[in-house]
Amino acid sequence: MEQARLIIAIGLSFLVFFIWDAFFVEKKTVEKATVEQVEPQPAEQLPGTPTEAAAPLKEEPLQAVRPVTDRQSRIITVSTDKYEARLDERGAAITGFKLKDYKDSIGENAAMLELVPDMVKGGTVHVYLEDNSREGMRNEVFSAGNTPDQLTVNNQPMSVEFSWMSESGLEVIKKYTFTRGTYLIDMDVTVINRSATDRRERLSVELVGVAPKKTSYAFEGPSAYIDEELEQIKIKSIKKKNIYKGKIEWIALEERYFLTSLLIDSKNEGSFELATDSGLVTGKYVHPARDYKSGKQVTYRHQLFFGPKQMDLLNAAGRGLGNLINFGFFDILAKPCLKFMNLIYSVIPNYGLAIILITIIIKIVLWPLGSKSYKSMNEMKRVQPLMAEIKEKYKNDKKKQNEETMALYKTYKINPMGGCLPMVVQIPVFFALYRMLYGAIELRHAPFIGWINDLSAPDRLFSFGFSIPFMQPPYGIPVLTLIMGATMFLQQKMSPPMGDPAQAKMMMLMPIVFTFIFINFSSGLVLYWLVNNVLSISQQYYIQKKFA
């Protein structure tokens, strides 16, 4: 009975967890002043804030002549050991970014993973002067000078510098600096006032990406680190609120396993502004308003991180980017599990075996709780005939039936909740592992054995040419999931028989229900649940034999 209650509890926990996460959990928002203009900063410069210096003015009149920009733009390709970036003179934007260590599919001939798909017209990382023509700068052709079309970064960092002049005499210089061995890219934006009059402007940097089409158990969409708090904004929430203000360390557009992000080197408050259109989402960081004095220049320093959502890499990037790895309510348990799994992998380079080992270790740690639960279940099983007699004898007197049942428990020193409570304690551990295994990039395209060549995808043996109800593509035989369902059925048969016929029928359906629930889960998750079931069956069998 207690095992039945446990399975029902876990099933209900599944539903409550998913429904609560999808519909009721509101992400913490940061409320700041609603004024759009930011007051000028004090004359003294804070560390990490935009720097102001004399501009290298020409000897000709200050009202500079704007260069002709209707020419065809050039594409500059920069290659490092980690990625291949395509930079377009039009907008000085990143129009392509391929990761060399990650493929878009499984197979020897699979292409490198592209973080800036063709759908993102015009690319990403655009800069604007907010109080001038915003669209104009995006479509203008910057000049990359004599920079060659192909660059390969080896031991020394290499820079690509783009420049553009506005009609009002503001020159914008956008400089990317690429370094081998890292996904971090330095990006400085310098604004030079070559006009004869002082100006006041707000510089912004915009990321553009594809909006997620469906909800995911791992967050996807725009996020930011504001006032030392992680802010993750669901796409459907942007219509309600699209501007967030505060001390912003970084902004990002997240996918399940990858991200494009901007790290801001400033101690001033800025704003994070969001918009969606035609299946795209844009996240823009707007710097505070600045005075650009005639003949002076201001430099804004940033870094870009275009790469995998891998905890060690994000922590090494600094500025709190590691906080982007967030497993919600179960974060405090999930992150140590992720670190431990990677530690096991460093010794045994197979993530399937790492999942098995971490499941065994967790089972050993929780062994006393499990033993107490199974011992209680075994005692309940022994008194089932006596309980049946009490129900039959007092079937018309529920009060007397309950009194006699409690007296029976007292006589045999049985705690009716003894089987449930120790098992319920393990539910948070299960959900922590569930969240971790679902979002861990380490499992993406990670092989295990045989047909299981991607622990982040559902297991499928063979590939059918037709669709199967309740199954997401690819269509095939979910061998691991079916075995998992069989172990659940065996566990049920080993549990005490149900006294209530309705509950007995429900329990007969639970293995089938769970099999359907898990049929589209990643094989890494199914593997964990299968191994946990096998260990639980072994422990239950041992306890039953010991106290028979």
Image (cartoon, rainbow, N blue to C red):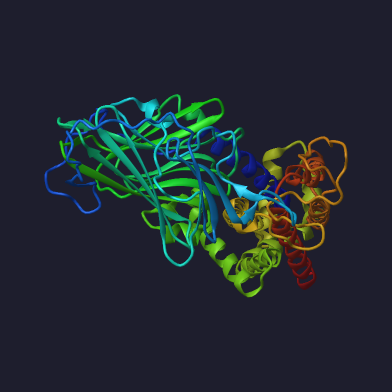
Q: Residue furthest front?
A: 60
Residue 370 vs residue 289, the one in the foreground: 289
Report how many numbered discs are placed on residues in the image. 0
- Identified at 47% across, 39% down, the residue is 124
- For residue 365, side relative to residue 323 (left or right): right
Q: Out of 544 and 90, give the one closest to the viewer.
A: 90
Q: Nearer the viewer, residue 422 or 108?
A: 108
Residue at the farthest left position: 43
**Image coordinates for residue 384, horizontal then vertical, percent:** 79, 54
Residue 532 on image: x %, y %: 71, 61
Residue sitting nearer the eye, 250 or 456: 250
Residue at left 58%, top 42%? 17
Q: Position of residue 262 (x, y in %)?
A: 41, 46
Residue 448 visible in rendering: yes
Q: Up-down: is 43 above or below 36?
A: below
Does residue 393 appear to the left or right of 371 in the view shown? right
Q: Is residue 35 above or below residue 153?
A: above
Residue in the image at 58% along x and 35% along y: 212
Q: Is residue 522 left or right of residue 235?
A: right
